[in-house]
């Protein structure tokens, strides 16, 4: 990821973190810790969104969000069992429409969806890089999870 993308992403990530916290979740981007050189470090562009569904008694989802270029391209978005964990367990994924656990999310706001559907490059399904794209993606995922009341894929 280029430096300009990193700066833009860090700026927008602060707003995403506040939105997630307001809904009972949080945003994780692990950086180097001088006091613990063995601590895990995320590469530039990689974030973990801990999303708490609004339905009572539901466990949070961990979304692995990776941006290669920000804000000009949509992120790769997968679900993990924990921050830094594997993404190949269907039970870590929401049972929402377009979420094909454990492979991809076939929606216009993901790199995977845009790669599968060339026709999405234009019109209302085209990637939108204006505003805060990270917040746009996060809000879409939260809405999709809440629409199925926090149900998990099986």
Image (cartoon, rainbow, N blue to C red):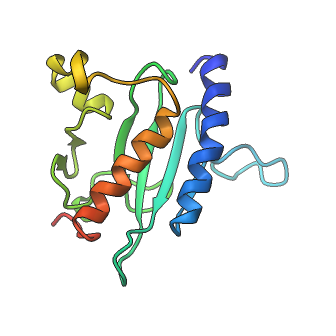
> What residue is at 63 percent from the left and 50 percent from the top?
40
Q: Quadrant of the C terminus?
A: bottom left
Position of residue 63 measured from the top left corner of the image (x, y, whole percent): 41, 52
**Residue 147, relative to residue 33: is it above or below?**
below
Q: Is residue 95 left or right of residue 24?
A: left
Q: Quadrant of the N terminus?
A: top right
> What residue is at 29 percent from the left and 69 percent from the top?
150
The answer, for residue 41, to whether it is visible in the render is no
- Which is more toward the observer, 20 or 80? 20
- Which is more toward the observer, 125 or 39? 125
**Residue 68, relative to residue 154: is it above or below?**
above
**Residue 145, relative to residue 54: is it above or below?**
above
Q: Within the image, what quadrant is residue 5 found in? A: top right
Position of residue 41 measured from the top left corner of the image (x, y, whole percent): 64, 44
Q: How many marks?
A: 0
Residue lying farthest to the bottom in this orientation: 57
Q: Is residue 43 left or right of residue 125?
A: right
- Which is more toward the observer, 86 or 75? 75
Position of residue 36 measured from the top left corner of the image (x, y, whole percent): 78, 54
Q: Within the image, what quadrant is residue 9 found in? A: top right
> What residue is at 20 percent from the left and 22 percent from the top?
120
The answer, for residue 51, to whether it is visible in the render is yes
């Amino acid at each position: 990821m280029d430096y300009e993308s990193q700066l833009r992403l860090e700026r927008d990530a602060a707003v995403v973190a506040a939105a997630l916290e307001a809904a009972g979740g949080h945003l994780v981007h692990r950086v180097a810790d001088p006091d613990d050189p063995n601590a895990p470090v995320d590469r530039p562009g990689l974030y973990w969104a801990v999303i708490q569904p609004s339905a009572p008694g539901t466990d949070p989802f961990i979304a692995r969000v990776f941006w290669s270029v920000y804000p000009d391209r949509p992120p790769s978005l997968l679900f993990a069992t924990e921050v830094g964990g594997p993404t190949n367990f269907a039970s870590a994924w929401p049972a929402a429409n377009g979420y094909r656990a454990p492979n991809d999310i076939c929606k216009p706001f993901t790199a995977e969806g845009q790669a599968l559907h060339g026709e999405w490059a234009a019109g209302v399904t085209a990637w939108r890089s204006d505003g805060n794209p990270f917040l746009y993606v996060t809000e879409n995922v939260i809405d999709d999870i809440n629409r199925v009341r926090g149900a998990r894929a099986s």
